[in-house]
Image (spheres, rainbow, N blue to C red):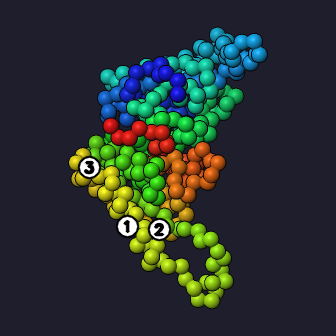
Amino acid sequence: MAEERTPSPKVAVGVDGSDSARGALEWAAAEAGHRGLPLYVVHALSMPLVMSVYTTPTRFHPSQEIAEQGRRVLDESAEHARELRPGLRVETELALEDPSQALLLRTGRRDMVVVGSRGLGSVRTALAGSCGIRLSSRAECPVVVVPRRGERPVQHPGPERIVVGVDGSVDSRRALDFAMHRAAAHEGSSVVVVHSWNVPLPFDTESLTASGWAPPDDLLERHSEELVSGVLAEVVDDATEGVDVSAVRTRHNPVEALVEAGADADLIAIGSRGMGGLRGLVLGSVSQGVLHGATVPVAVLPRHAAENE
């Protein structure tokens, strides 16, 4: 991680002029205003690298037209954020790097990064849809991916219903800890803990089921209940003991379970990797599935995210 160019803590948001990025900006402005943090608005130009065997790689400098267009995007975004949150400290930066690299270079462990789920396309120097996935797999701070804006307005910073997926992994405990402390900071908020116990068995169950065999549902359900209770006991502290918590235990596919439970939520919180993450994936398959399928903002707690401070 490169040395931070901007102070922490802060809320950083990537913008590109798209409707999705505007939704991310509004969410980030609300978050920064509620937490009393500065908002850093970054527009990435994705200028190509010049490679040479004789010199270190350098980036093309943008033309005056490209630079002016980028500054217009930043100025309009900053003005919109200040209109939404009067008194909010807003700073902007025009970056030469691609969106994910630009935000990674300018954030650290104590920050939060917010991006839209889709942009205008890389040809127009936008935040591509995969930017959230790349950020979530490499950032050291929570990454919030905000879907395209619909009719539903930004609810926060009022009471939130936060859905969080747990599976016993370290990353899912971080996600639950994040959700619990966030709910404690937003009076009237609640947390819904989702655990899927749809465990694939290492043998063919079709023939066994035909002969009358059935999976040990009672055993799996008891294990699920113990897992959820155990994880909650690990993260609850003096600040979060009064948070309203409920649990959903299901045999549905983890992605389907989280997307369904979060359909009417204000935020879904997940870890970047879980117990069932496929080897070789930088970001877990469940996390990627939720990012693609969710219709509400998703907060990903990366593997290197700092513990709650």
Residue designated by label 1: 226
Q: Which residue is mark 2?
A: 250
Picture residue at 40% right of the left edge, 63% below the top: 227
Nearest the viewer among 185 and 23 is 185
- Give the Cα separation between the discs numbered 2 and 3: 27 Å
Q: Please tell me whether residue 264 is drawn above or below residue 282 in the rendered image.
A: below
Residue shown at 52% from the left, 43% from the top: 147
Percent position of residue 290, x then y: 54, 52
Q: Earlier in the sequence, mark 1 or mark 3?
A: 1
- 213, 89: nearer the viewer: 213
Residue 47 locus on image (x, y percent): 67, 20
Element class at badge 3: loop
| Neighbour tally class for label 2: few under 14, some 14-19, many 20 plus, Cα within 10 Å | some
Location of mark 3 (residue) = 237
Q: What residue do we see at 62% from left, 30% from top?
A: 126
Q: Residue at x 37, y 67 (%)?
A: 226
Task: Find out whether the residues at labels 2 and 1 contact each other: C-beta distance under 8 Å.
Answer: no
73 relative to 192 in the view: left or right: right
* In this view, 170 is above or below 198: above
Using the numbered discs, state the Cα–Cα distance from disc 1 to disc 3 in whole angstroms: 19 Å
* Identity, as a three-letter code, of the amino acid under mark 2: Thr
